[in-house]
Structure formats: structure tokens, C-alpha cells
Image (spheres, grey):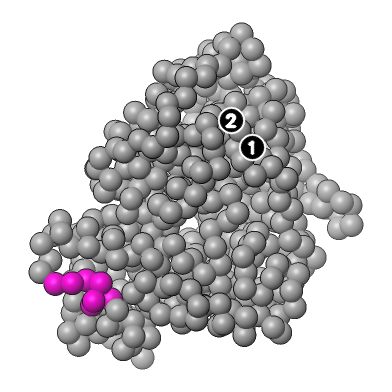
Amino acid sequence: MSGDDLVPRARRRRIGAWRVVLAALCVVTALAGALVWSGRLDTDTVDPGGTASATADATRLDDAAPCSGVTGFTCGFMVVPLDRGGRVPGTLRLGVAVSTGHDARRGTLLLLTGGPGQPGVSLVPRMLDRIGYLLDDYQLVMIDQRGTGGTAIDCPRLQAEVGSSDITQASPRAISECVGVLGPARDFYTTGDTVADLDDLRRTLGVARWTLDGVSYGTFVAAQYALTHPAQVERLVLDSIVPLDGGGTLYAAALQRTPFVLRQACQEQSCGFDPVAALTEVVRRHDLGVGVFDLLVTASIVDPGLKGPPAYEPVLRLLRDAADGDLGPLTEAIAVQQGGKGTPATAYSAGLHLATLCADLTDAPWGDSTTPLAGRPAALAEAAARVDTGPYDARTAAGQGIAHNCALWPPTRPNVRPSLGQLTMPVLLLAGDRDLSTPLAWAQATARQAPRGRLAVIGGMGHSIQGRHPDGDAAVRAFLLDAV
């Protein structure tokens, strides 16, 4: 049974506050920690008189005008074809924001948000709070990637069921509805399509070369752009990293990282029990793997210490009580944090998220995104039975949203990958050692493909580092300001 009438009034107040916290988490908070450097210090410099100093001409945008509510930025639009192959007609009008009135002696910095599903332009004020100090040296550009912001894909049932979660399962009905909303256009929301849009933007703004800074899925877009157009990229900052070949259909690295995060939090809290054993017990006895995994990823975003916001019980306590037989509070917490009723598509498009992820997968057990639906469930179950799931089980690996939802997403045009396999430019990689959304193993794999890269691992930190940890900010300053 469900319904607010079944929830005690005091708990209802806590649930409401928890929803408010989650709805605000487009970019996330984290704890302080230690900085660990891996790789050599890059000493290459950018010639202040060369192409790096070229800045964007915002007047080249359609309907360019001062941004509403943001001082020092010009907003406008860039029109791109939906289908560059010309088979499906239509265009997309992408919003763009460009900072003005600064010297920008080090050129243009394109900041890419995450998801896929987050907009760019509406997040300019938030990002200025975190990296505004760079405006003395760089001109900042943000864009609503196709399918977000003003072109957001709005699939109402899918939006309500999964919101901004990678892990929540969508119903077949929600997925079918979204396929109907998109129609033939669903083929044209791959990361490769966004990469082409970004290079159109570079040319539109008259920029010869620029620096890219991506957060979460934005790191994947930035890296794919750099692999496709290496001559146009000065430097890359990759914060909370998705690897060059994608994150993995079964999300195995995050499942395997969970014990480390739980034990670190337990040590800090002197929790007095083994949270990994408790998680294992809950998953195997109650078939709650997907829900608990979803809760833990979200909780680690809110607070990598897993203390939880003051409005709700700490996650470790929920696990302990569930393992001891009191399952109610844990199942209630899972139910509360799932769903997207407070997240409109313009703030995070679940439809774009699914269309892009499912086309981008390179390691799906069933093959690429052109594979017929009929053979997918068996291939997924077989692969999940073989993978190391840590304290979870095969049903968790197969049932979390990336695998489950993409197994139901109909055949589409796959993402086109660049031919290069290494990032040849200077790269700063930022990773939190408690990040369950983009786990440390992903950053380490990407660092091995960046011969001029530096990996900064922030101890005690979760997802999204810039503007949230002094050591992370110091690494960005050294990379973008001191070294150039």
C-alpha cells in the first residue's frame, strides 16, 4: 500500500525536506579531504598571443541580447539541423550564454554540464558561484545541449518515474510513451550529434581553439569533442569522469566501489557494525538491490559521509535497521527519493537522458543500439550473472536503470565514435574517492588514455568537485591559470 495518509505526520515533514534537497541537486556537495596527485606536472604553456587568446563573438548568435538576471553575459541562440544527414527534417534552436566585458587573455572556456539531461544557460549563475574566479582570464561559454533547456525532450510519464536518476527503473509504458514523443527524431540525440553542435558553436563564435571543462556526463562530451577535434582544444578539465568508452551498461565499477564508501563512512561515524554485511543481507533477503543502490548513489551525492541531510535518517542506520528486521524506514526512504515529480524536463530531461545513453552504449550485452529487442533480456541476464557485483547480486546489475531501461529502448542509430583513442592535449582529471555516480576506477582508466594528464583524487569527496573543495579548486587554478 502507498499514500501520504499512511505516513506519520512527523515523517511526512522529513520526506518533504528530503525531496527539496534532492530537487536542488543538479550539481552536488561533498566533504573535505586530502589531495593525491598522480602523473607528471605538465609544464606546457599557452602562447598569450596565439590562437588561445581568441575570444568568442557573442553578437554572432541569433537574437543576441543581455542575459536576463545575469550581469555580464550575452544570451542568444544557434540553430542546428536535427539530422545532419538530411533524412529527417527539422532544426533545433540551442540556447547559448557568453560572458562579456572581461579581458579573457587566456581565451574561451566552454563549460559542459552533466546528465545527459542538464541544461547550460539556466545554470550560469550557479556555476559562477563555483568557478567565477576564472572570468578574469577566460571568457565563459555555456550551451543548452540538444534535448535540454529550451529544446528539452519532455516525456511526462518517464519524467515522473525516473527524474534525474541513472538507476531507477522505468516502466515499459513510460518508455513506450517517450518513444512516441520522439518519433524518428530519437535517432539524433547521440553524444556525437552534440559534438557536432559544439563545433558549429565554435565556428559561429569565431573561436579558433578553446578550453573545455566538463562535469560528469559533460566530461564524456568534452573528451569526445577533444578526440574528434584535437586541433581545436587547448586544454581539458574533466571533473567526475565518465570514461572514453562510456560508463558501462552493468554499472559494475560503482557496484564494486560501494563497500569502500560504506566502510569509510562507518569509520568516521563509529557505526559499530559492518555496513557491507548489512547491505548484503538486505539485498539478498529482500530483493532490494536496485532500490538500495539508487539510494546509496543519491546519498553519496548529498553527503559522501552518508550522514544524510538533517531532514532524514542517516543511510547507515537505515541499512542496520533493515538488516535487523525493521525494513520499513529503508523502503520508505527508497520510495521517497525515487521519481521526478519535482524535476521538470527543462531542469533535467529524462527523455534526453535515455535516448542518449542507450545510443552511446558500447558494451551492452546485446550488442549496439541497433540490436532487436527480442534477444536483449537473455543476453543481459547472462552477462549480469558473470559480472562482479560486490555486495549486490546479478538482479541489481541487470535491473538498475542503465541496463534495464536501455534493454527496453527500441533500436536506434548508434553513436559514432571518434577514431582517436587518446587525449593528446593537457588534461586535468578530478575525482572524488567516494563518488558512486562516476567511480574512481573510471577516472583512473581515463588517465591512462591521457599521456599529458594529471589525476587529482580528492579524499572524502563525492561527485562534482569544482567550487566544493579547496584542493580541487587549487588544482584547477594551477592547471588553468598558473601553468599557462
The structure residue drawn at horizontal position 57% and vertical position 11%, both measured from the top left corner, is: 48
Amino acid type, residue under disc 2 in the picture = Met
Q: Is residue 130 magenta?
A: no
In the picture shown, does residue 67 fall above or below 301? above
Q: Is residue 458 left or right of residue 54?
A: left
**Which residue corresponds to mark 1?**
226
Could one spot residue 69 in this view of the protein?
A: no
Q: Quadrant of residue 158?
A: bottom right
The structure residue drawn at horizontal position 18% and vertical position 72%, both measured from the top left corner, is: 274
Q: Is residue 276 magenta?
A: yes
Q: Secondary structure at mark 1?
A: helix
**Which residue corresponds to mark 2?**
425
Could one spot residue 371 in this view of the protein?
A: yes
Of residues 367 and 126, which is closer to you in this image? Answer: 367
Mark 1 or mark 2: whose residue is earlier in sequence? 1
Looking at the rendering, the stretch of residues picked out in magenta corresponds to: 273-279
Q: Secondary structure at mark 2?
A: loop
The structure residue drawn at horizontal position 35% and vertical position 42%, both measured from the top left corner, is: 457
In the picture shown, does residue 483 fall above or below 91? above
- Assess whether mark 2 and mark 1 are in contact (beta carbons under 8 angstroms): yes
- Mark 1 Cα-neighbour bin, 10 Å: few <14, some 14–19, many ≥20: many
In the picture shown, does residue 295 fall above or below 379? above
Q: Position of residue 229 (x, y in %)?
A: 70, 35
Q: Is residue 206 left or right of residue 266?
A: right
Q: Position of residue 84 (x, y in %)?
A: 83, 48
Q: Position of residue 289 (x, y in %)?
A: 38, 78
